[in-house]
Image (cartoon, rainbow, N blue to C red):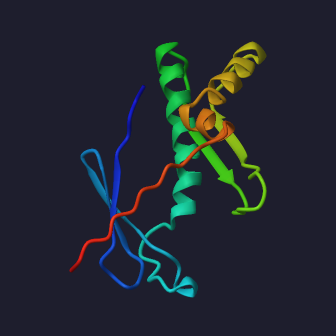
């Protein structure tokens, strides 16, 4: 099992969150119409970016391992944010390269095996604890 720890710290009333994940730091924000400053992606955009980048990386790893000749992998993910029904992610993958039909079919299976794809397909559980600290 691969445990991931992500920490978000917000001290700005404009919703900017400073994120620490492993050795990486970045910010997340909300659009101006939601009270943010629109200085960075909003959380739901990171969800789509996670699926797109995981798909691309998974395909690249496979194609590099198989020594397939390709120029570029582009993954476009679209979805409507809803909390009342399951989300339908629409993912369009464009691979620049020449592949016979058998390999194309295999690459679709590889794309569907990316870890984020698998996570999003399954039901989830969130366990929450909250701690209040006096200033």
- Please state which of residues 39 and 129 is positioned toward the viewer in this rendering: 129
Residue 40 coordinates in the image, percent (x, y)? 43, 70
Q: Is residue 72 above or below residue 52?
A: above
Q: How many marks?
A: 0
Residue 120 coordinates in the image, percent (x, y)? 63, 41
Residue at 28% x, 45% y: name it: 22
Q: Is residue 107 above or below residue 31?
A: above
Residue 27 quadrant: bottom left
- Please state which of residues 40 and 123 is positioned toward the viewer in this rendering: 123
Residue 110 quadrant: top right
Residue at 57% x, 31% y: name it: 114
Q: Is residue 48 left or right of residue 13?
A: right
Residue 109 coordinates in the image, percent (x, y)? 69, 23
Residue 55 coordinates in the image, percent (x, y)? 57, 36
Residue 22 in view in this figure: yes
Residue at 30% x, 78% y: name it: 11
Residue at 70% x, 45% y: name it: 91
Q: Is residue 88 left or right of residue 116?
A: right
Q: Is residue 13 left or right of residue 61?
A: left
């Amino acid at each position: 099992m691969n445990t991931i720890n992500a920490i978000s710290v917000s001290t700005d009333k404009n919703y900017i969150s400073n994120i620490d994940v492993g050795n990486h730091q970045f910010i997340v924000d909300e659009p101006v119409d939601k009270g943010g400053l629109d200085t960075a992606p909003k959380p739901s955009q990171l969800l789509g970016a996670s699926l797109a980048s995981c798909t691309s990386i998974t395909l690249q790893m496979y194609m590099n391992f198989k020594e397939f000749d390709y120029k570029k992998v582009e993954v476009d993910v679209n979805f409507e944010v809803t909390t009342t029904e399951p989300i339908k992610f629409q993912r369009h993958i464009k691979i620049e390269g020449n592949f016979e039909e058998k390999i194309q079919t295999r690459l679709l299976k590889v794309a569907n095996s990316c870890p984020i794809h698998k996570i999003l397909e399954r039901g989830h559980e969130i366990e929450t604890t909250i701690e209040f600290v006096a200033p």
